[in-house]
Amino acid sequence: MKSAYKRILLKLSGEALAGSQGYGISPETIMQVAQDVAEAHKTGAEIGIVIGGGNIFRGIAASAKGMDRASSDYMGMLATCMNALALQDALEKVGVHTRVQTAIAMAEIAEPYIRRKAMRHLEKKRIVIFAGGTGNPFFTTDTAAALRAMEIGAEAIFKATKVDGIYDKDPAKFPDAVKWDELTYIEVLNRQLEVMDSTAISLCMDNKLPILTFNLKVKGNILRAFQGEKIGTLIKAN
C-alpha cells in the first residue's frame, strides 16, 4: 500500500465538512475525513492540507450583500482557521501528528506560516494544515492551495469536494451531464468551469502542477487518489 506520490497538497472544501447539516462542522464528517487522511498518510506520502471556510462564512457571498470585500474576506480566513483546528483535533485523535500554520499571526493557537518550518514538518512525516488562506483579501483558498503547493514542492493538488469530478453542466440539475476524466488547464479556463478560480488554475498552468478533483464523501477516495487509481477528473498540461 505505497503512495504513487512523495508529497501532495490536499485541498478540502469547507462545505464538505458540514455534512448533511449544510453549515458548521459535522463531528461525524470531520472524523471520517481524518480517518481517510490517516489511511493515505500510512502510504508514506507527505501531506499538506489547505482547508476552505465556506461551511462557516463565505467572504464573496457577504460582499455581494454589501459588506466590505476586504473585511468579509478576513472573516472567511478566520473561518478556515476554525476548520483547521477542528481537523487537527480529529487527526490527532486517530494518531496522526499535525501542525497548523496560519497566514495570519495567532501565536496562541497555531504556528505562523514559515515555509522552511513547514518543509521540516513534512520531512518528519507530520501533516501540515495551512490555514488563513494566503493572508490577503481578494484571494480564495483555491489560490492559497496552489501557492502553498508550489512553495512546498508538491507533485500535485488533490481537490476533494462534494462532486466526483468535473462535468459539462451541474449533475445535480441535469441527469445527462457528462463527466470528463481529463482536461487541460486551457479547457478549464475557456469553458469557465468552476472547479477552481482562474487565478489558481493559471498559477498551476504556469508551473505545470496537475490538479485531481474527486468526491470527498466516498470513503477511501483519498487513499485511492494517493495510490494513483483513476478517480475523479485530472487537469494537466496536455
Image (cartoon, rainbow, N blue to C red):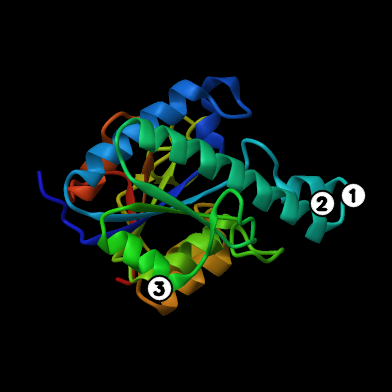
Pick whichever of labels 3 and 2 is earlier in the sequence: 2
| Image quarter (top left, top right, bottom left or bottom right) of the C terminus | bottom left
Question: Residue 47, percent across and down?
Answer: 32, 54
Identify the element where label 1 is drawn.
Answer: loop
The residue tagged 1 is 66
| In-front residue for pair 56/195 | 56
Q: Which residue type does callout 3 highlight? A: Arg
Proximity of marks 3 and 2: CB atoms separated by less than 8 Å: no
Above or below 93: residue 78: below
Secondary structure beneath dot 3 equals helix
Name the residue rendered at 51%, 33% in the picture: 17
Q: Exactly how many numbered labels are in the figure?
A: 3
Q: CA distance from mark 1 to mark 2?
A: 5 Å
Instruction: Give the amino acid type for the residue marked by disc 2 in the picture.
Output: Ser
**Does residue 155 lie above or below 88 as drawn?**
below
Label 3, on which residue? 116
C-alpha gap between disc 3 and disc 2: 35 Å
**Residue 110, position in %: x, y?**
54, 52
Residue 98 point in image, percent of width and height: 38, 48
Q: What residue appears at the point 30 percent right and 50 percent down from the top-left corner? A: 181
Q: Which residue is mark 2?
A: 63
